């Protein structure tokens, strides 16, 4: 009889613990890893999403590498990234798009194009000066390379908001400009149109 | 009073007072005191109240404390739903205190939260029950002001493209007004003006001209026009009383027991038109090359291009949101009684034109559009009242919480006026003179700022706010300090 009581008490304690765990577990926050291409619930409205970002960059990088001036060049052309102009009504870090394209081209273009890092221009100048003075050892050239092409772009949008509904048409264009002649040797764009309605509780 | 024995000998008499009654009364008193003490606001709550509701009404509030209190609240997981509300109040405190970088950072975070946060479950629960359970994003005019302040911070910083983005977003926010106010979707004139200025800076003159034209389009509601007339009448009476009190104050100060040397008489009525063209301590010459006396002149793109001194003057405290109706199911706004409703600018002691009122927060609040919201709120209230009266199950439904969302941005200004002028580069003294709705001068609202630098290239943008006794608060504080 006593053993039965002890057993039932044990089961009760176990059940209570399990219930408490479930309740506490239900209240706890959650973190999960997502596929970058998947649409997450946090991506709302007519703004650009991470999926748009990846699609645009991949398509543009693929298009850029097909340009004859890059494909048929005897030595890989040198490219610098210029600031991408944001003419939309959204607050976006546009330069990140060009940086992503650079990453993709460096990874997959098998050296057919070379990028110049101008973000360290001052530091590189200082390094070269120190090498010239003999303060630092050197193993070759001591001047910064000039660019053959500028990679830049322009984002534009047309948007309309009326009451709960909003629509945005996006045009994201990129171009490669000859640094010597200012001739545009490549340009491509990506268009997106999105519509969205805001929740009635926010109106 | 005859004493009543606690225990009578012989026959037991009913006890009607005495020790048990005293003990019971004491116990109740202690319980009530403990209860009251327990219900009183904590120091943190008092600080939070000051930071949210009193920064505009106090002459010289402690802004650092306000920013600190709001920053802690904003980052607290417990108050996640109010992240945007605390951020909005923090922006007010930071801009008033001159911490523009802080306001910029907080504004951008809050803007992104408004744009990106979505929780369908919360929204559904808010639609069926208490509307305050949802993540706070503010009303259209609050979202517009959030974008306006963030844009202004970018503009001050020379980041004109992002300023353009945020000013455009402020207009998008007001465009989301409900169908019943669709005529007011494009009447956020403050946003249009600054969007125009950002376009000018970016070299897009055509777009700037369109934006400036839209600033001319003022659309008051018929009820506002009626209210305006009533406010003028009320203010006339108030002004008379105010002058009487100022006179008594002066007499007491000049001839009382402890006369104050050099006390100023503020009892003389002065109208805006009678204000002097030159103040007593004016410089030798007026520093202003160009200023605008009329709105049409002010909005001339050539004038706007030439202007190198811009003042954003915030007047009074914004409207108050309140809940009413059965179970507090409805929400509405009421105007806060603000005296200062017009402002003139003096530069180096010379009268240099008015600042133009381009945003009335009460107008913006009452034109938010409530068609969808009222349908939902009234539907819930009627359903609850019917179900509450149903036999047997009615009691359950009396616990159904259908209150509207009473959260709002309490530290918004009542009106925002903008002044622009083309002045000689260098240091200048700025004096602001405020007027009531009837154009009567309000000397207690005077603001004076010295050594305001206008650069050779570029421009100077300054934010100022009206508050009664802001300039002589130290005099008022002296008796307190002596105590």
Image (tube, grey):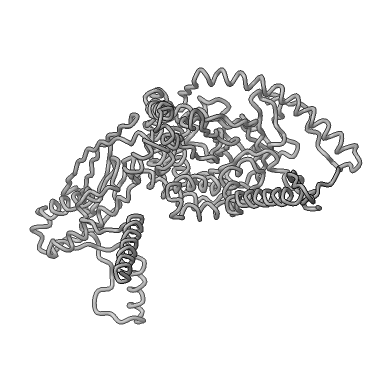
Q: Residue B246: image x %, image y %?
A: 79, 32
Q: Which quarter of the figure has residue A30? A: bottom left
Can residue B196 be seen here? The reply is: no
Q: Quadrant of residue A111?
A: bottom left
Residue visible at 64% across and 21% down? Answer: B232
Q: How many marks?
A: 0
Say above or below: B346 vs B104: above
Give the percent coordinates (x, y) of residue B299: 48, 29
Residue located at (61% from left, 41% from top): B56
Residue reaching furthest to the left: A72
Give the left or right position of residue B445, taking residue B97 as reference. Answer: right
Between residue B92 and residue B9, name the one nearer to us.
Answer: B9
Left or right side of B29 for B134:
left
| Residue drawn at (82%, 30%) of the image | B247
Image quadrant holding the N terminus of chain B, namely top right
Q: In x, y percent, where is residue B431?
A: 66, 39
| Nearer to me, B418 or B335 | B335
Q: Is residue B76 above or below residue A130?
A: above
Q: Give the side of residue A138 with respect to residue B288, left or right.
A: left
Going by the image, does A130 lie left or right of A189? right
Residue A32 position within the rendered picture, expressed as x and y whole percent measured from the top left: 27, 58
> Is there any visible trace of residue B99 in the rendered image?
yes
């Amino acid at each position: 009889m006593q053993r039965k009581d002890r057993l039932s008490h044990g089961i009760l304690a176990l059940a209570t613990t399990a219930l408490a765990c479930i309740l506490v577990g239900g209240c706890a926050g959650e973190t999960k890893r997502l596929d970058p291409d998947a649409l997450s619930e946090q991506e709302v409205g007519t703004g650009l999403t991470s999926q748009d970002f990846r699609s645009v960059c991949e398509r543009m990088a693929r298009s850029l590498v097909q340009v004859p001036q890059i494909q048929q060049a005897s030595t890989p052309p040198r490219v610098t990234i210029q600031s991408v102009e944001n003419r939309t009504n959204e607050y976006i870090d546009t330069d990140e798009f060009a940086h992503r394209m650079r990453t993709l081209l460096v990874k997959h273009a098998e050296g057919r194009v070379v990028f110049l890092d101008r973000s360290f221009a001052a530091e590189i100048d200082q390094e070269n000066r120190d090498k010239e003075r003999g303060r630092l050892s050197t193993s070759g050239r001591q001047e910064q390379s000039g660019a053959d092409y500028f990679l830049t772009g322009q984002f534009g949008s047309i948007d309309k908001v009326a009451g709960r509904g909003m629509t945005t048409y996006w045009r994201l264009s990129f171009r490669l400009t000859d640094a010597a002649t200012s001739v545009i040797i490549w340009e491509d764009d990506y268009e997106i149109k999105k519509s969205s309605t805001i929740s009635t509780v926010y109106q | 009073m005859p004493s009543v024995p606690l225990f009578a000998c012989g026959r037991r008499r009913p006890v009607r007072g005495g020790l048990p009654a005293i003990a019971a009364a004491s116990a109740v008193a202690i319980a009530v005191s403990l209860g009251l003490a327990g219900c009183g606001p904590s120091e943190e709550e008092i600080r939070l109240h000051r930071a949210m509701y009193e920064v505009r009404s106090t002459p010289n509030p402690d802004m650092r404390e306000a920013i600190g209190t709001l920053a802690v609240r904003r980052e607290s997981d417990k108050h996640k739903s109010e992240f945007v509300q605390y951020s909005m109040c923090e922006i007010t405190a930071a801009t008033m205190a001159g911490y523009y970088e802080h306001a910029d950072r907080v504004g951008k975070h809050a803007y992104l939260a408004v744009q990106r946060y979505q929780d369908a479950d919360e929204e559904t629960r808010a639609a069926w029950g208490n509307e305050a359970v949802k993540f706070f994003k503010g009303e259209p005019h609050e979202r517009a002001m959030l974008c306006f302040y963030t844009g202004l911070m970018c503009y001050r910083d020379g980041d004109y493209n992002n300023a353009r983005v945020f000013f455009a977003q402020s207009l998008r926010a007001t465009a989301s007004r409900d169908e019943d106010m669709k005529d007011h979707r494009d009447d956020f004139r403050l946003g249009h003006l600054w969007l125009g200025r950002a376009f000018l800076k970016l070299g897009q003159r055509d777009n700037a001209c369109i934006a400036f034209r839209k600033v001319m389009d003022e659309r008051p509601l018929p009820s506002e026009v009626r209210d305006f007339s009533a406010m003028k009448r009320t203010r006339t009476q108030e002004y008379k009383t105010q002058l009487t009190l100022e006179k008594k104050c002066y007499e007491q100060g000049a001839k009382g027991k402890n006369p104050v040397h050099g006390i100023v008489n503020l009892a003389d009525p002065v109208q805006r038109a009678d204000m002097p063209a030159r103040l007593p301590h004016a410089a030798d010459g007026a520093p202003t090359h160009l200023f605008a006396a009329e709105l049409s002149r002010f909005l001339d793109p050539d004038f706007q291009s030439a202007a190198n001194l811009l003042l954003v003057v915030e007047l009074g405290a914004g409207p108050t949101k309140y809940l009413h109706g059965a179970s507090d199911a409805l929400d509405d706004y009421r105007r806060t009684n603000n005296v200062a409703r017009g402002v003139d600018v003096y530069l180096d002691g010379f009268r240099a034109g008015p600042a133009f009122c381009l945003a009335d927060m009460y107008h913006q609040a009452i034109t938010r559009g409530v068609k969808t919201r009222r349908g939902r709120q009234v539907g819930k209230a009627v359903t609850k009242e019917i179900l509450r009266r149903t036999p047997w199950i009615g009691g359950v439904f009396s616990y159904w919480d259908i209150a509207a969302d009473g959260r709002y941005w309490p530290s918004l200004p009542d009106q925002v006026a903008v002044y622009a002028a083309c002045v000689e580069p260098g240091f200048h003294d700025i004096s602001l003179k405020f007027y009531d709705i009837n154009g009567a001068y309000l000397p207690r609202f005077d603001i004076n700022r010295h050594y305001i630098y206008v650069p050779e290239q570029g421009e100077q943008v300054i934010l100022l706010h009206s508050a009664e006794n802001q300039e002589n608060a130290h005099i008022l504080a002296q008796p307190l300090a002596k105590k």
